Amino acid sequence: MTQALELEPTNVAWLMLRAKAHQLSNDITKAALDVADALILDPTNAANADQLGQIKMATREYAVASWCFSEAIRLSPNDFSYYRNLAKALAAADQIDGSIELYEKLTTAEPSFEQNYLALAEIYIEQRQADRAAAVCARALDNGLASIDLFQLAGIAANLNGDSDAAVAFYKRGLALDPENGGLKHLVNVTTNLSADSTPAAYIINLFNKRAADYDLSVFSRHYRVPGLVRNELLRVRPKVDPSRATPYKLSAILDLGCGTGLVGVMVHGVTAYLKGVDLSAAMIAYAQTKQVYQELEIAEVVASMRADPRLYECVVAGSTMEYVGKSEDCLAAMYKRLLPSGFAILTFLAGEAGVDYALGADGRFRHSRSYIERVAKEAGFDITQIVEEQLETLDGTPIMGFVVTLTRPLR
C-alpha cells in the first residue's frame, strides 16, 4: 500500500487500508496518521472519523476519541453504532453521566440490541448503583433478551442488593444455557459460600478481557501497591543488581506469572536480561505488549505454561496471581522446577483466616493463611526467605491486607 500511495497519495481508500494494516501490526501511531490524512482529504466520511476514534480509544486518548465519534454522529446521525462508541468513550474518560444518558437513550432506540443493556448495567454496577443495574437487566429480559452475560449481570446486581437467592437463580438460568460455564459456576460458589480449589479459567478470561482497557487506571483508585512491593523485595534479595549497568549486573531471566497489563513487568524489567510474561487474558497481554518491556509474552494458564517451558529462571514473580489459585500445591511445585538452584520467587497472597488453608471471598478471590503458605512452600522444596504482611490495596476505602512471600530454591 505504501508503494501504491507513492503513486496516488490522495487515494482515501488506500490510506484507510494501510491504516488497517498498521493497526493489525500494532503500529497505532502510523495507523492514526493515515486515518487523519484520509479525513483531511474527505472530511465528510463518517466511517473514517469513527475509525480514528477507535484508534484513539486503543491509545487511551479518550477525549480525542469522543470528539471523533461525535463528528461521526454529526455526519451520519442515523447510525447507532457511532452513538455506542461515543458512550463507551465517555465512560472510559470517566464522564459517567454522559455515558449513562447515551446508553439509556440507546436502550429505547434499539430495544433488541443487548449490548446496550449490558454496558449500561455494568456501569451501574461499577458505580455501586445495584438497583438501577437490576432495573436495566429486567428491561432487557422483558424485551425477550436472554443470554449468559445478561443472567450473570442480573445475578451480580441481585447479589449487591443483598438478595443471594435471586442471584443464584439468575446464575442457574445462565447455566441452563451453558451447563459447563466455569464463570457462572464460580459465581454460584462465591454466592453460596461453596468451597472451591481454583478460579475457573473461563471466569478469569471473561473478567480481565473486559477490564483490560481501563485496568491500569483503575489500580490508582485502589491504591494498588503490589508492583512496587515486588520490586522492593527483589532489590532487597539481590541488592547488587543495577538497572543502569550492563547484563552482568542484571538477573539472567525473570518469569512474570499472571502478568496482566505488565504493571509488575514495568517495575522489574530493568533488572533482568530476559523477561517473560504469562497470562490467560489475551486482552491483558495485548496491553502488556504495548509497554515493550517483555522479551516474550504467552497467553496460557500459568501452571501449564511452567510445565511446558524449558527455560530456567533466576526469579519468578507472581503479583496478585495467587488470589485466583486456591489450592496452591501444583503451582508452587511447577514454580520450583522453573527456578535455577539458588533462584527465588516473590509472590503475593491475600491474607485469610488463621487455621483455614484457603477460602473463596465474596469478591471472588481466594484468601490464604500464613500456615498454609509455609506448609505448601516447604512441601514443594523451597526455603522460606521471608513472609511479610502488607497492605496490598484498598477496596471501597477498606485496606486489603496480604502477604509478600519470598521463597528460595536451595542449592541441593
Image: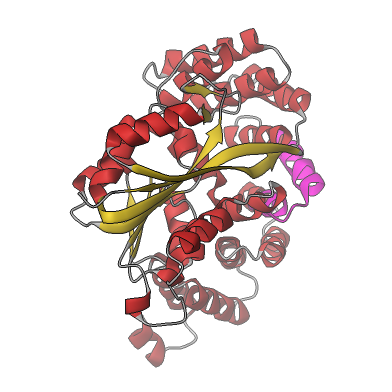
Q: Is residue 229 left or right of residue 377?
A: right
* Quarter residue 374 falls in: top left
Provide the major secondary structure of the magenta segment: helix
Q: Is residue 335 left or right of residue 365?
A: left
Above/below status of 403 relative to 24: above
* Quarter residue 131 falls in: top right
Q: Looking at the image, which is closer to me, 289 or 399?
A: 399
The residue lying at 68 percent from left, 23 percent from top is 157
Residue segment shown in magenta: 85-107
In this orientation, does residue 328 appear? no
The residue lying at 65 percent from left, 43 percent from top is 391
* Quarter residue 285 falls in: bottom left
Q: Looking at the image, which is closer to me, 154 or 193?
A: 193
Whether the magenta-drawn stretch holds residue 96 is answered as yes
The residue lying at 42 percent from left, 77 percent from top is 14
Whether the magenta-drawn stretch holds residue 78 is answered as no
Above/below status of 129 relative to 81: above
